[in-house]
Image (cartoon, grey):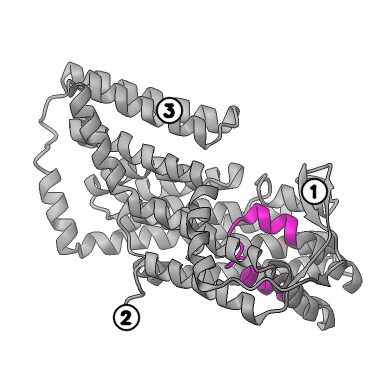
C-alpha cells in the first residue's frame, strides 16, 4: 500500500485540524516572558476555558498562504539552494571531481555511510541540524550514487542521523538546554547519562542505515539503474579543466562559509539564502554560462524545489489553524492531565507518550518545549518525579517523532529534495523509530530507578 502524496497528506492534516476546532472546547494557559530563555512560556496550572473560535473550511484555506508567509525564510532558502545546485550540477564540474576522487581514494560504501551518519548525527547533537541538510542533499546524492547507494540511503544517513542525534543530545540548544532552562535546571546537567543513550541510539540508526545501503546496492531499482547509467558517462578518466577547478573552489569556499556562518556566527536563513544565491551566480559566470545561461539554470532549480517549499508552508499551516481555533492548549491540557493518576514509572512513560502526540500538531521542538515543559514540570513535582526525567520524556518523545510526523515540514522538504517518497521513508524508518522509542523508554525507566 502507498500513502497519499505528501501534499495530499498535509492538506488533509490542515482540514483535520480545522475540524478539530469544532469538536474540542477552546481553552488557554496564561503566558509570561521568561528572562532566562527570552521566550514566552505558559504558566502551569492556569488553563481556563475561552470563547470558542472554530475555523471554517474557507478560513482553513486562507490559513495556507498565512502558513507560507510564516515559513517564508525557510521557503526562500529552499528555492535558492535548489537554484544554486542546479547551476553547479549543470556545469558537470562536481560530477567529474567526485569521479576523480573515488577513483583515486577508493569507494568503500559502508565506511562512507557510517562516517556520514556520525557527522550528521554530530550536527543534530550540537545545533539541531535539519533545514541545513536541504543545502547538502544535492552533493550527498551525487556521492551516494557514485558509491552505488540510492537517494533513500542519502536521506537516512543525513536527515535520519541528525534527527536521532538531536533527540538524544545532551547539549542541543533548541531541545534539551531550552527545556532545562524552562524547567529551572542547570544547563547541560545530566550530560553523562544522556550521552550513554546517545551512543546507543546512534548505533541503532547507523547499523540500520549501513544495512539499508547494502541491501539497496544489491537490488537497484530500474530508476536508479537509469540514473547511474547516465552518470557513468562521466568517467574517472575525464580531465578536470582549469575552469572546473575554479568552480570547485567556489563550491568548497561557499560550503566552508556556510558551515562557519551557521556554527560560529549564528546565521539565519536570510544569510544562508544569500550565500547560496551568490554561489549559484558566481559558479554560472565562471563556468562560462553567462548571465542568461545562469538565470535559466537557476530557474530550473527553483522549479525543481517547488514541491519541497510548498510542503514546509503546509506543515506550518496545521499549527496556525489549531492556534486560530484556540485548541492548542486544550490538546496539551487534555493529554497531560491523566498522567497525574499514574504510578511513577508509568507516568514517565505517559509523559513521553503525551509528547509524541503533541508533536504531531506542534512540529517545532523549541515551540513544544516552551509550551509543554511548564505544564509537565508541575505534574512531575506532584508525582515526586525529577524534573530531569520530565525533560528526558520531552526529548525522546518529541525529538524522535520528528523522524516520522508529516507535519515536520523540514523533513518533508529534505525528502522531496532527495526524491524519496514519504511512504518509502516510513517503511524504512518506522521499525527504527519503534526501536529507538524502546531505547528512550528504557532510558526513562533507568532514570526513574536511579533517581536521575
x, y percent for residue 256: 44, 26
Res. 405 visible in picture: no
SS state under label 3: helix
Name which of mark 1 and mark 3 comes first in the sequence: 1
- Asked whether, in this view, residue 266 is left or right of residue 142, the answer is right
Which of label 1 and label 3 is nearer to you? 3
Q: Secondary structure at mark 2?
A: loop
For marks 2 and 1 on the same chain, the one whose residue lies earlier in the sequence: 2
The residue where tag 2 is placed is: 1
Magenta stretch in the rendered image = 348-371
Q: Nearer the viewer, residue 159 or 295?
A: 295
Vertical order, 204 against 108 (above or below) = below
* Residue at mark 1: 181
> Would residue 25 be counted in the magenta stretch?
no
Does the rendering let one see residue 352?
A: yes
Q: Is residue 438 above or below residue 419?
A: below
**Which residue, given by chain and number where applicable, does mark 3 sit on?**
275
The answer to whether residue 49 is left or right of residue 304 is: right
Amino acid at each position: 500500500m502507498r500513502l497519499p502524496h505528501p501534499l495530499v497528506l498535509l492538506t488533509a492534516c490542515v482540514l483535520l485540524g480545522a475540524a478539530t476546532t469544532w469538536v474540542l472546547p477552546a481553552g488557554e494557559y496564561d503566558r509570561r516572558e521568561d528572562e532566562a530563555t527570552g521566550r514566552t512560556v505558559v504558566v502551569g496550572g492556569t488553563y481556563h476555558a475561552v470563547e470558542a473560535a472554530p475555523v471554517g473550511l474557507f478560513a482553513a484555506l486562507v490559513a495556507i498562504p498565512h502558513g507560507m508567509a510564516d515559513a517564508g525564510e525557510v521557503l526562500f532558502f529552499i528555492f535558492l539552494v535548489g537554484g544554486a545546485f542546479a547551476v553547479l550540477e549543470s556545469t558537470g564540474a562536481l560530477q567529474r571531481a567526485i569521479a576523480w576522487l573515488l577513483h583515486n581514494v577508493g569507494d568503500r560504501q559502508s565506511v562512507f555511510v557510517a562516517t556520514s551518519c556520525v557527522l550528521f548525527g554530530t550536527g543534530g547533537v550540537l545545533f539541531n541540524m535539519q533545514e541545513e541538510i536541504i543545502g547538502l542533499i544535492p552533493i550527498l546524492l551525487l556521492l551516494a550514487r557514485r558509491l552505488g547507494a540510492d537517494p533513500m540511503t542519502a536521506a537516512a544517513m543525513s536527515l535520519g542521523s541528525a534527527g536521532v542525534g538531536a533527540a538524544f543530545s545532551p547539549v542541543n540548544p533548541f531541545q534539551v538546554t531550552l527545556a532545562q532552562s524552562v524547567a529551572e535546571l542547570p544547563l547541560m546537567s545530566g550530560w553523562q547519562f544522556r550521552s550513554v543513550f546517545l551512543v546507543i541510539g546512534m548505533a541503532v540508526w547507523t547499523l540500520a542505515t549501513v544495512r539499508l545501503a547494502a541491501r539497496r546496492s544489491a537490488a537497484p531499482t530500474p530508476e536508479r539503474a537509469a540514473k547511474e547509467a547516465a552518470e557513468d558517462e562521466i568517467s574517472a578518466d575525464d580531465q578536470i579543466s582549469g575552469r572546473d577547478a575554479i568552480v570547485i573552489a567556489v563550491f568548497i569556499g561557499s560550503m566552508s562559509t556556510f558551515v562557519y556562518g551557521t556554527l560560529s556566527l549564528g546565521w539565519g536563513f536570510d544569510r544562508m539564502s544569500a550565500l547560496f544565491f551568490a554561489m549559484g551566480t558566481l559558479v554560472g559566470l565562471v563556468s562560462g554560462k553567462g548571465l542568461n545561461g545562469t538565470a535559466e539554470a537557476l530557474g530550473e532549480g527553483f522549479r525543481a524545489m517547488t514541491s519541497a517549499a510548498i510542503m514546509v508552508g503546509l506543515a506550518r499551516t496545521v499549527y496556525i489553524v489549531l492556534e486560530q481555533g484556540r485548541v492548542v492548549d486544550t490538546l496539551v491540557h487534555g493529554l497531560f492531565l491523566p498522567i497525574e493518576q499514574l504510578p511513577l514509572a508509568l507516568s514517565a512513560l505517559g509523559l513521553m507518550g503525551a509528547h509524541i502526540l503533541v508533536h504531531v500538531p506542534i512540529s517545532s521542538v523549541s515551540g513544544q518545549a516552551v509550551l509543554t515543559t511548564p505544564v509537565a514540570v508541575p505534574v512531575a513535582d506532584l508525582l515526586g518525579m525529577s524534573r530531569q526525567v520530565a525533560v528526558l520524556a520531552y526529548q525522546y518523545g518529541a525529538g524522535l517523532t520528528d523522524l516520522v510526523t508529516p507535519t515536520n515540514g523540514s523533513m518533508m522538504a529534505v525528502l522531496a529534495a532527495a526524491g524519496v517518497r514519504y511512504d518509502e521513508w516510513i517503511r524504512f524508518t518506522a521499525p527504527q523509530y519503534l526501536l529507538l522509542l524502546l531505547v528512550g523508554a528504557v532510558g526513562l525507566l533507568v532514570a526513574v530507578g536511579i533517581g536521575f
